[in-house]
C-alpha cells in the first residue's frame, strides 16, 4: 500500500497478507491468558480490548492518523473538507437561534486537522467563535491540542475529555464525529446448519488466536432471525454494532443540539428496518497496510464498514425513559453532502488564490468526491432536537 492508506477501500488493490500470521504483542499475551482462564471472548469484546484496553489499547497508546501513523482521513486529504464542516457548524448555530453559549464538540479529533480547518473558516461567521466553547473527546493522547486551537478560542474555553458523559448537558451543542462510528464494537454472527452462532476469539491447537463459533444463541431467536431474513444461507456472516457509546448524548434534553456523523459504510433505503445484511467487514490497518484482524492486537487499527440502516434505526428508536426523541436527517453520500455545501466553489476559489497548488487541490477534492470511491463509500447522517429545521446538506 502507499503511504496514504484510508481505512476504507479507495479502489486501490490491497497488498496481500498472510492471514495465519500472529504477533505476540503485549495485548495478545494478555488476551491469551484471559481466554485460557475464562474461555473465548466475543468479537465485540476483542475489538473493544484492541482499541481501548487501559494498558495496551491501540487508541490509548498512540496517535494513529497521518503519515507517521497508520492511515489518513478525509481532513488530511484536503483542507476544504474541514473548512466546509466548520461553516456547516456555524450555520447550524444560527439555526438553533445563535445562542450566546454553544458547545462545539468533536469525538475522536485525532491530530485536530478537521477542527483547525473548520475554526479558521468559521471565523467568517460573525459571533460564532465568540459564543463557542470547544470540547474534544478522545481516549487517544491529545497532547498539545488545546494550545493548537488557542488562536481561535480562548484556552479557558477549551476542554479535553476522555468520556462522552463528561460533556455538560445544559448548554446547546453541535457535535461532530468523523470516522467515529466505525470504531464502535462489532459483533459477528454466522449461519451454521440452520442456526445462528456467535463468532468469538479463542485459541487453536497451537495456542494462537483464532476465530471460533459459539452456539449460545437461543434456538427461538435463531429461527426468528432466519424467518425474517430468508436471504441468509449457511456460511453467511452478518454483523451488528453496539452504538451505546452515543447513548449519553441522547439524554440531552435541556438545550437544543445537533450532531453530524461521517463514516464509510453501506445504506439501502429500500431495506428499512430489515437491517441484516450478509457481510464480513472487520478489518485491520497497521503502518499503512492491511493485515488480518488477529495479527497484531493493540498495535493495529480495527474498524468495520458501518451499516447505516442500523445507525438510523438506533438513532430513531426510543431506548429508555431517559432518552428524548430526536429527528434524523439522511444518510446521504459524502459526495452529495459536500457537493451541497459548495465544495467545488470553495476549491475553485482556493485554486485561484494558490495557482501553484491548483493541481494538488483539484486532485484532493476529486478523491473526496470520487464515485465509485470515497464520494459514495462514505455516508453522512445528522441528528437534531425535534423542532429544529433539517440540517444543511442532508
Image (cartoon, rainbow, N blue to C red):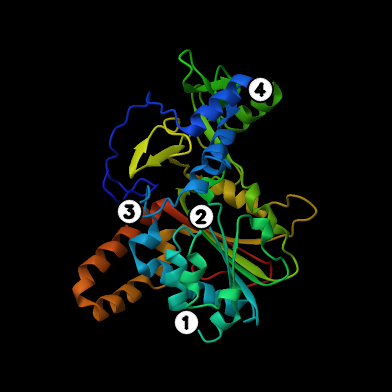
Labelled disc at residue 67: 3
Residue 15 in sight from this viewpoint: yes
Pick whichever of labels 2 and 3 is earlier in the sequence. Answer: 3
- Which picture quadrant has residue 49? top right
Pick whichever of labels 3 and 4 is earlier in the sequence. Answer: 3
The residue that mark 4 highlights is 216
**Secondary structure beneath label 1:** loop
How far is the residue under mark 2 from the one under mark 3?
17 Å
Q: Nearer the viewer, mark 2 or mark 4?
A: 2
Mark 1 Cα shell of 10 Å, populated few (<14), some (14-19), many (≥20): some
Labelled disc at residue 123: 1
Q: Position of residue 40 (x, y in %)?
A: 59, 23
Q: Position of residue 356 (x, y in %)?
A: 19, 74
**Secondary structure beneath label 2:** loop
Residue 276 in sight from this viewpoint: no
How far is the residue under mark 4 from the one under mark 1?
55 Å
Q: Nearer the viewer, mark 3 or mark 1?
A: 3
Q: Nearer the viewer, mark 2 or mark 3?
A: 2
**Secondary structure beneath label 3:** loop
Labelled disc at residue 141: 2
Q: Is residue 321 left or right of residue 110?
A: right
How far is the residue under mark 3 from the one under mark 1?
29 Å
Amino acid at each position: 500500500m502507499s503511504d496514504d492508506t484510508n481505512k476504507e477501500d479507495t479502489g486501490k488493490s490491497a497488498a496481500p497478507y498472510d492471514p495465519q500470521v500472529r504477533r505476540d504483542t503485549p495485548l495478545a499475551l494478555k488476551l491469551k491468558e484471559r481466554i485460557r482462564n475464562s474461555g473465548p471472548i466475543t468479537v465485540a469484546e476483542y475489538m473493544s480490548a484492541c482499541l481501548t484496553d487501559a494498558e495496551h489499547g491501540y487508541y490509548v497508546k498512540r496517535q494513529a492518523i497521518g503519515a507517521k501513523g497508520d492511515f489518513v482521513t478525509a481532513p488530511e486529504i484536503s483542507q476544504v473538507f474541514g473548512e466546509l464542516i466548520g461553516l456547516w457548524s456555524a450555520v447550524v448555530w444560527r439555526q438553533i437561534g445563535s445562542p450566546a453559549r454553544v458547545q462545539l464538540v468533536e469525538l475522536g479529533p485525532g491530530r485536530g486537522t478537521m477542527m483547525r480547518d473548520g475554526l479558521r473558516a468559521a471565523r467568517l461567521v460573525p459571533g460564532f467563535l465568540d459564543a463557542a466553547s470547544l470540547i474534544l473527546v478522545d481516549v487517544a493522547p491529545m497532547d498539545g491540542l488545546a494550545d493548537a486551537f488557542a488562536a481561535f478560542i480562548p484556552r479557558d474555553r477549551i476542554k479535553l475529555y476522555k468520556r462522552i458523559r463528561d460533556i455538560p448537558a445544559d448548554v446547546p451543542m453541535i457535535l461532530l464525529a468523523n470516522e467515529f462510528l466505525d470504531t464502535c464494537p462489532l459483533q459477528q454472527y454466522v449461519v451454521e446448519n440452520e442456526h445462528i452462532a456467535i463468532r468469538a476469539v479463542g485459541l487453536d491447537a497451537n495456542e494462537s488466536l483464532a476465530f471460533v463459533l459459539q452456539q449460545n444463541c437461543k434456538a427461538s431467536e435463531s429461527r426468528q432471525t432466519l424467518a425474517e431474513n430468508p436471504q441468509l444461507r449457511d456460511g453467511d456472516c452478518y454483523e451488528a454494532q453496539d452504538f451505546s457509546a452515543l447513548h449519553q448524548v441522547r439524554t440531552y434534553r435541556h438545550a437544543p443540539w445537533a450532531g453530524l456523523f461521517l463514516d464509510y459504510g453501506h445504506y439501502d433505503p429500500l431495506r428499512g428496518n430489515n437491517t441484516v445484511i450478509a457481510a464480513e467487514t472487520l478489518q485491520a490497518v497497521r503502518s499503512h497496510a492491511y493485515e488480518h484482524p488477529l495479527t497484531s492486537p493493540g498495535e493495529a487499527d480495527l474498524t468495520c464498514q458501518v451499516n447505516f440502516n442500523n445507525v438510523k434505526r438506533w438513532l430513531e428508536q426510543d431506548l429508555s425513559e431517559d432518552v428524548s426523541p430526536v429527528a434524523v436527517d439522511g444518510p446521504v453520500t459524502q459526495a452529495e453532502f459536500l457537493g451541497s455545501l459548495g465544495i467545488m466553489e470553495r476549491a475553485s476559489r482556493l485554486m485561484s488564490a494558490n495557482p501553484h497548488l491548483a493541481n494538488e487541490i483539484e486532485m484532493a477534492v476529486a478523491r473526496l468526491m470520487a464515485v465509485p470511491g470515497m464520494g459514495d463509500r462514505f455516508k453522512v447522517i445528522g441528528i437534531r432536537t425535534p423542532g429544529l429545521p433539517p440540517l444543511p446538506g442532508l
